[in-house]
Image (tube, rainbow, N blue to C red):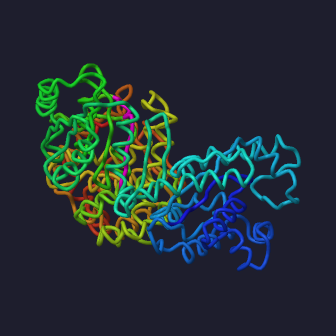
Amino acid sequence: MELLLVGLSGAGKTTVARLVAERAGAELIDLDAEIERRAGRPIAGIFAAGGEAAFRALEADVVAELAGDPADDGPVLRRVIAAGGGAVVDPLNRWRLYRGRRVAWLDAPVELLADRLAGAGEGERPLVPGSRATERSVALEALLQARRRFYAAGERVPAEDGPAEVAERLVALLGPADTRTSTQNRTQRGARLLDAATPLGRIVIGAGLAATALREILEARGARRVAILSEPEAWRLHGERLADAVRARGLDVKVVLLPRGERAKTLRVLEATLRQLAARRLERQDPIVAVGGGALGDVVGFAAATYLRGVPLIQVPTTLLAQLDASIGGKTAVDLPEGKNLVGAFRQPAAVIIDVALLATLPPRQVRAALGEAVKMGVLGDERLLQCLEASGPALARTPASAVASGALAEVVERAAWAKVEVVSADEREAPGAEGRIRLNLGHSFGHAIEAAAGYRRILHGEAVAHGLRGALAVGQAMGLTPNGRAERISALLDHLDLARTPPGVDPEQVMELLAADKKMAGGRLRWVLPTADGVTVRDDVPPEAVEAGLAAALGGGATGGRAGGGRAASGGFGDARRGARR
């Protein structure tokens, strides 16, 4: 067994780790001390010479080398690791540090931590400046708010007392629990990488934790009966195991299976689902758990929003698209022949359990398609996400199981999902006239129209979004909003991911007619989300010639079709349909 201590500066991680290691005869690793040893200077000197970026790069190298995989998951404590306060901000660091270890968050009031840091020398704590305790408290509180979700993935251990008392508390926490628990059961806990209480519900991200997290959340709610709604493939791969884990805790589990994919998102299926919930006598306090992809989550969320005027909803997304996008934000809907997601409701879940280990079974095409949504989130302003996709995007889709094992998919999921949490938290219901949540519709105007024109067959949602991104880039360029360099970078990334490189094979006139039914219409004008140099802007004054350029790019097919034959293929018959997009 190995123990990792995390927490803010002043929490006593190094001192407590040393005491616990001495008592157990375990090896001690102090990550900050090792960084200083390798750099040949104190942390303050590293910051002074190269800034925080230089320190974090060295920190990541040390974590990658020293953390590795835990050597032993037995009951004997073999290593104690004290991590720097910010070491766990980086998703890959957390992937390397948290898996297979007991993680303890040493937590104390920031005012106490500020007092403890009073004796630190000038510049010794670069991220907690200030000669007065109040200044240090403000800095520490800001760091806590930014890092709480990473620390909370561990077990909170009060650290107000002296180091000896905290060490005793840790020893008591570790000893009896792990001595009584089999190695197999400890392994089944999985790794929790992030745990956040948000306005959008509790967000839990990890690997191999779906069953444990679901049981924990249901027990915290005092649930005695639960409905698990899934579709046949997700049920076979994941749902049945989750249901058995919940039943093992004595809960009554009702199961409802829906059709797979977009076939579930119809009013007919919604009615059948609601009737099955009624037949099973579900009551208002009984949670509904959605186990499946984004389409399944949409219709189950809508059912949870409307059955008995609203019952608790827990999302357990099993596809990459659902984990990084669809399960978060509370939008639920079904489709109509006239357009996608035209009937729905806002319904924030009680919790979203994102287990990246579930992605190892996905077909490569589904992973690649979902990366279209990840590109969208990167274009909204997450430079690090774009860099991740540029560096390893094709490998993610080629071998999903390896991408899960390396932590690469976990980083993409976390960055994209958390970016969406931040956008939606600021504008939950897409307020009229606001440029908040509507930004998430980048690529979706053309994308949704292409999906509908294809009859919600042949093309996956993420693939349609990729086509829509190419269209949005062309519209932005035509209006002088999207710099050529930015457009070329995003287009090259889509090519790199093998997304939207061939025409989708839909009727241009039908696509234009469907644009007129887009949900982003306001005052009879379609609000377009268009890329800029470092983000997006929202415009409702897009001229017809820019729409035509966008349609040609969206339907043309990437590097060849979009710039060669795409324009001619898409140019006939715009007429009223083109005007309808602005009607």
Give x and y (percent) for residue 440: 41, 44
Front residue of this view, candidates 412 and 442: 412
User: From the viewer's perspective, is residue 166 above or below residue 563?
Assistant: above
Residue name at image x 21 percent, y 34 percent: 252
Marks counted in the figure total 0
Front residue of this view, candidates 505 and 519: 519
> Of helix, strand and loop, which mostly describes the magenta segment?
strand
Report which quarter residue 488 is drawn in.
Answer: bottom left
Q: Is residue 444 left or right of residue 116?
A: left
User: From the viewer's perspective, is residue 342 above or below residue 34?
Assistant: above
Magenta span contains residue 177: no
Inspect this view and state whether residue 356 appears: no
Report which quarter residue 553 is drawn in.
Answer: bottom left
Inspect this view and state whether residue 37 appears: yes
Magenta residue span: 346-355
- The C terminus, quarter of image: top left
Give x and y (percent) for residue 568: 23, 59
Give x and y (percent) for residue 520: 36, 34
Magenta span contains residue 354: yes
Front residue of this view, candidates 401 and 294: 401
